[in-house]
Image: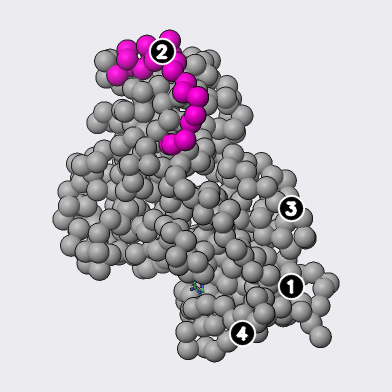
């Protein structure tokens, strides 16, 4: 009898695991159950009238050769290599990100002066617990006050001193620093600004469609090798016998028996009382009839008075993500109220006026604006999150994986790496800094 494996969630982690298991010689019967109508999870792409919109900026970037080989195996020639071009909007101007000497030189003088003095004012406390402790100890209070605190509080909806320091390890390090350039404290940041080292900022993107092309190719391979991918299937819980998981229950599609369940849907669904929290994001996909002036792929906006936290320009990933001569924008907004979730269109006027105020678009060029509520985009690392994870009693027959399943602020390459290791029965270290 073949072994029955059920994978909950057809995002990149679930698909990678399913693709590897079905490709193996082992006698395994693999079924992937996915809530949405198409695979991909957070790496999905929406399309309308010739415009393609990923869920915010999505790029493949990894230094893990196993992941890199796997990416290229799935994509074949269907990929392009692109240089990163990201910005941050600070003091009323677009500046390159990670910060360069030129963009830092343009910051207000009092901020520059106070930040410089912080180099000599190191007060590293004994115990670093919070995001705020970590960033202040690395970059000084002034840079923290000037940028990191507001951006993080706006983005997460939580106070920066109530977030675990892992949020900084995972989020800030990955966004700010290229692994090869040491810039993880104020002094090395300054050195890096004065004597910049060459860095490889090149990343992979698909050469057709959006980022979901990768997942569609995985899905094709899974079904070709005899696996099943069932979309539009919401899993509601687990079947248990004598303390062991024996299947998964679904809404309206019955129960799927299993010898082993891999769970990449939110862990909070399995352990509702454990207190795990996720961020939900509202994205507005905007089609524009003419090219605008935005020369970045994505840009961060830390100002609390601006509605969105990040803008993405798909054209700067690949020109044919928009019809010829057109342009588009993806605005990401953290959901912080019921109203935002149920009536996102009510934000339209404010969004457009904020976009115009930072010269991101000309209002007369807007063709359409599509609002999407994307649930569980980021796990929220409060101060107790590690205890919560350590205290989980995961029953036999169940393995947690992926961003939401293992409550991990990861990237696509991390989800792939974790799933590859699982398929091969290898240990995989959840290293926040493995990029
Ligand atoms: C705005 C944004 C930008 C990002 N940019 C990048 C980037 O540039 N580079 C990068 O590498 N990564 C990026 N990421 C991260 C990347 O998207 C994720 O790390 C990766 O896609 C996670 O894949 P996953 O399979 O682990 O999880 P998910 O994609 O969350 O997959 C989980 C799946 O489970 C399904 N599911 C949930 N509940 C149920 C249920 N009850 N029943 C059945 N199915 C269910 C979901 O629909 C989903 O398909 C970004 C993420 C976001 C939100």
The residue wearing badge 1 is: 22
Q: In this view, does 376 lie to the left or right of 227?
A: left
Of labels 1 and 3, the one closer to you: 3
Depth check: 339 or 166 in front?
166
Q: Residue 360: x percent and y percent?
A: 27, 44
Sequence-earlier tag: 4 or 1: 1
Sequence-earlier tag: 1 or 3: 1
Whole-number angstrom distance, CA of label 4 to CA of label 3: 27 Å
Whole-number angstrom distance, CA of label 2 to CA of label 4: 60 Å
Using a 10 Å C-alpha cutoff, classify the residue at mark 2 as few (fewer than 14 neighbours), some (14 to 19) or many (20 or more).
Answer: few
Sequence-earlier tag: 1 or 2: 1
Q: What element carries label 4?
A: strand
Q: Residue 268: tell me if it is visible.
A: yes
Tag 3–tag 2 contact (CB < 8 Å) = no
Sequence-earlier tag: 4 or 3: 4
Q: Is residue 2 magenta?
A: no
Whole-number angstrom distance, CA of label 1 to CA of label 3: 20 Å
Depth check: 240 or 202 in front?
240
The residue wearing badge 4 is: 256
Q: Is mark 2 on a helix, strand or loop?
A: loop
The residue wearing badge 2 is: 121
Residue 68 numbered tag: none
Q: Residue 192: x percent and y percent?
A: 52, 19
Figure quadrant of the N terminus: bottom right
Tag 1–tag 2 contact (CB < 8 Å) = no
Depth check: 316 or 285 in front?
285
What stretch of residues is rendered in magenta? 111-131
Q: Residue 45: tell me if it is visible.
A: no
Q: Residue 372: x percent and y percent?
A: 34, 65
The residue wearing badge 3 is: 427
């Amino acid at each position: 009898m073949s072994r029955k494996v059920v994978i909950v969630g057809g995002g990149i982690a679930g698909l990678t695991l399913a693709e590897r298991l079905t490709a193996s010689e082992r006698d395994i019967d693999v079924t992937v159950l996915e809530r949405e109508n198409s695979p991909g999870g957070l790496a999905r792409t929406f399309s309308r009238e010739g415009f393609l919109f990923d869920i915010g900026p999505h790029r493949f970037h990894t230094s893990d050769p196993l992941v890199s080989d796997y990416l290229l195996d799935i994509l074949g020639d269907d990929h392009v290599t692109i240089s990163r071009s990201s910005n941050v909007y600070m003091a009323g101007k677009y500046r390159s990100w990670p910060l360069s000497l030129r963009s830092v030189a343009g910051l207000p003088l009092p901020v520059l002066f106070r930040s410089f003095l912080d180099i000599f004012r190191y007060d590293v406390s004994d115990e670093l617990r919070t995001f705020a402790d970590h960033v202040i100890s690395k970059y000084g209070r002034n840079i923290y006050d000037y940028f990191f605190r507001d951006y993080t509080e706006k983005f997460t909806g939580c106070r920066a001193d109530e977030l675990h320091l892992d949020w900084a390890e995972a989020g800030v390090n990955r966004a700010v620093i290229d692994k090869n350039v040491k810039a993880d404290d104020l002094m090395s940041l300054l050195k890096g600004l004065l004597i910049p080292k060459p860095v490889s900022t090149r990343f992979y993107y698909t050469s057709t469609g959006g980022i979901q092309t990768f997942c569609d190719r995985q899905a094709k391979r899974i079904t070709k090798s005899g696996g099943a991918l069932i979309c539009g299937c919401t899993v509601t819980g687990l079947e248990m016998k004598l303390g062991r998981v024996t299947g998964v229950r679904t809404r309206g599609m019955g129960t799927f028996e299993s010898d082993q369940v891999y769970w990449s849907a939110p862990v909070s669904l399995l352990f509702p009382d454990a207190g795990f929290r996720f961020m939900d994001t509202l994205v507005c996909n905007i089609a524009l009839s003419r090219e605008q002036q935005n020369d970045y792929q994505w840009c961060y906006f830390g100002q609390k008075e601006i509605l969105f936290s990040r803008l993405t320009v798909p054209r700067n990933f690949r020109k044919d993500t928009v019809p010829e001569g057109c342009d588009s924008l993806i605005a990401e907004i953290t959901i912080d109220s019921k109203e935002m979730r149920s009536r996102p269109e009510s934000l339209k006027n404010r969004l457009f006026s904020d976009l115009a105020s930072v010269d991101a678009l000309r209002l007369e060029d807007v063709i359409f604006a599509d609002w999407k509520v994307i649930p569980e985009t980021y796990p929220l690392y409060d101060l107790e999150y590690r205890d919560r994870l350590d205290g989980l009693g995961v029953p036999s027959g169940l393995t947690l994986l992926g961003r939401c399943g293992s409550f991990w602020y990861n990237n696509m390459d991390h989800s792939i790496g974790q799933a590859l290791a699982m398929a091969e029965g290898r240990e995989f270290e959840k290293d926040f800094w493995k990029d």
